[in-house]
Image (tube, rainbow, N blue to C red):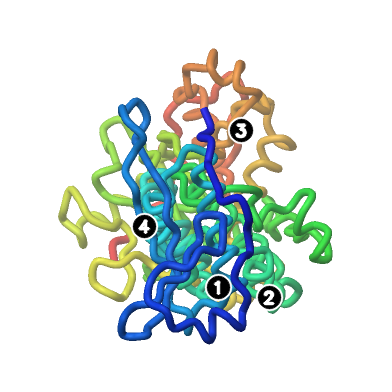
């Protein structure tokens, strides 16, 4: 229940001139519990005097004095505003001194952002995603970091976003989203109140121009009919990047999945490559049935590695994978145009749809795509590994220029069509 606060019979008793000239030591009331205190030395300061008792305590409460600053630092108008805020705290059942102490202890935006990054690091899919978050909150939102989190305003957020809103539209949108989440976290912890100054709908959408959505389009892909010629070219090259690109094409994997592939993920006996969820885009473990052609590449590389763990396709730096530019640079050296590494997944999908009778769902599972809504996914327990094995075997034969098998013969060992890869 709100407390009843007794005030003087009159307010605003003091005038600015009197505050300046008053020399009599003692307390001089302005009303609303505000006093001008003149010390024997002649120094002058403002105090707010009130009674406070904790909820449930007996008696009238303890008389408390809260300093509001010297008259040199705080003028009469400012002192009255501070006294008014203290009265509101009392009326709300709060101790003004305790409320002010808590206010002073509120962290900066940077401190809250760092805590948010740490608390949410476990939900980040990759180091690259974590780096994007840190760059947004440490570099682009740098002007906000020293500001106390409850004082971050719309003007502060706009000062961060406007310089990059057009020139770096996607980066600006990402930064705005992370700033909004940090401020929401601050509010949840009691460090802020009111609306979020970084929210878009109904707020910043009225202050910033809508930027066109990034048109990513489809990744440029090689026609599946042209892949055998490329694979023949790659098979004659000793470079690790060439072997890795062949493995990427044969497994229809993503660039990052191949570059960071580890020997510990390979089961040669079962001919399965198991990619942990931590390295998958969707965050779920993905099993890839390995064709004879893919296994041949691994066997050719394994003697040089001679280990059960470690990178299958290491880069030039010790312990580091191939660069994310390795495949693009290789394709450029081969004069392969209008084709991206990711586009080979599209080539596989086109081949499966045009040249085979395999169900659409099977091809989507091979690409590690989520199929159907949440209810359908809940009932789809199997990853159809063995059915996909036949499909990937036929894809491997196609890639190396082998003959396609009839659908009723798929799944049988067609090792005669396997490509021979020599060790480097």
**Which residue is tagged 1?**
140
Q: Earlier in the sequence, mark 1 or mark 4?
A: 4
Badge nearest the viewer, 1 or 4 = 4
Q: Earlier in the sequence, mark 2 or mark 3?
A: 2
Q: From the top left corner, tell me how far across and down residue 400 is, in percent.
A: 53, 50
**Which residue is tagged 2?**
164
Badge nearest the viewer, 3 or 1 = 1
Q: Is mark 2 on a helix, strand or loop?
A: helix
- Estimate how packed mark 4 is, as few (under 14), some (14 to 19) or many (20 or more) residues with alpha carbons within 10 Å: some
Q: What element carries label 4?
A: strand
Mark 2–mark 1 CB contact (< 8 Å): yes
Badge nearest the viewer, 2 or 3 = 2
Q: Distance between the residues labelled 2 and 3?
A: 41 Å
- Estimate how packed mark 3 is, as few (under 14), some (14 to 19) or many (20 or more) residues with alpha carbons within 10 Å: many
Q: Which of 401 and 264 is in front in this view?
A: 264
- Estimate how packed mark 1 is, as few (under 14), some (14 to 19) or many (20 or more) residues with alpha carbons within 10 Å: some
Q: Nearer the viewer, residue 341 or 408?
A: 341
Residue 214 appears left or right of 10: right
- Estimate how packed mark 2 is, as few (under 14), some (14 to 19) or many (20 or more) residues with alpha carbons within 10 Å: some
Q: What element carries label 1?
A: helix
Res. 214 image quadrant: bottom right
Kindly identify the residue that appears in the image at 38 percent across and 71 percent down: 26
Badge nearest the viewer, 2 or 4 = 4
Kindly identify the residue that appears in the image at 45 percent across and 33 percent down: 414
Q: Distance between the residues labelled 3 and 1?
A: 41 Å
Q: How far apart are marks 1 and 4 (CA)?
A: 44 Å
**Which residue is tagged 3?**
363
Kindly identify the residue that appears in the image at 20 percent across and 57 percent down: 303
**Which residue is tagged 4?**
65
Residue 82 appears left or right of 26: right
Q: Earlier in the sequence, mark 3 or mark 1?
A: 1
């Amino acid at each position: 229940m709100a407390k009843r606060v007794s005030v003087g019979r009159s307010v605003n008793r003091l005038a600015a001139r009197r505050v300046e000239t008053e020399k009599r030591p003692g307390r001089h009331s302005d009303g609303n519990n505000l006093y001008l205190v003149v010390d024997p030395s002649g120094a002058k300061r403002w105090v707010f005097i009130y009674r406070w008792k904790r909820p449930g305590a007996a008696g009238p409460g303890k008389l408390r004095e809260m300093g509001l600053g010297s008259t040199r630092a705080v003028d009469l108008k400012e002192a009255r505003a501070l006294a008014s805020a203290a009265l509101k705290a009392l009326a709300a059942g709060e101790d003004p001194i305790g409320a002010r102490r808590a206010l002073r202890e509120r962290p900066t935006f940077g401190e809250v952002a760092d805590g948010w990054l740490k608390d949410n690091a476990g939900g980040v899919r990759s180091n690259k995603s974590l780096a994007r978050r840190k760059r947004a909150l440490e570099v682009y939102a740098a002007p906000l970091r020293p500001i106390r989190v409850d004082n971050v305003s719309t003007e502060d957020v706009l000062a961060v976003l406007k310089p990059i809103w057009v020139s770096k539209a996607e980066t600006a949108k990402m930064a705005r989203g992370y700033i909004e989440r940090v401020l929401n976290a601050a509010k949840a912890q009691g460090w802020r109140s009111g609306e979020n100054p970084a929210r878009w709908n109904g707020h910043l959408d009225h202050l910033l121009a809508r930027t066109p959505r990034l048109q990513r389009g489809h990744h440029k892909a090689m026609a599946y009919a042209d892949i055998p010629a490329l694979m023949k070219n790659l098979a004659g090259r000793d470079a690790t990047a060439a072997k890795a690109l062949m493995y990427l094409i044969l497994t229809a994997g993503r660039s990052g999945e191949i570059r960071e592939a580890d020997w510990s993920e390979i089961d040669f006996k079962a001919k399965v490559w198991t990619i942990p969820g931590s390295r998958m885009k969707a965050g779920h473990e993905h099993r890839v049935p390995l064709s004879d052609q893919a296994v041949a590449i691994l066997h050719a590389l394994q003697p040089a590695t001679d280990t059960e763990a470690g990178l299958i396709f290491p880069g030039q730096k010790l312990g580091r994978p191939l660069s994310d530019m390795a495949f693009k640079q290789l394709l450029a050296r081969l004069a392969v145009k209008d084709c991206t590494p990711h586009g080979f997944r599209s080539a596989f999908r086109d081949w499966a749809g045009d040249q085979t009778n395999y169900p659409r769902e099977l091809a989507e599972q091979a690409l590690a795509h989520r199929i159907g809504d949440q209810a359908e996914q809940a009932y789809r327990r199997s990853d159809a590994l063995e059915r996909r094995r036949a499909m990937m075997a036929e894809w491997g034969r196609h890639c190396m220029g082998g003959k396609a098998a009839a659908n009723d013969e798929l799944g049988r060992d067609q090792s005669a069509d396997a490509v021979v890869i020599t060790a480097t």
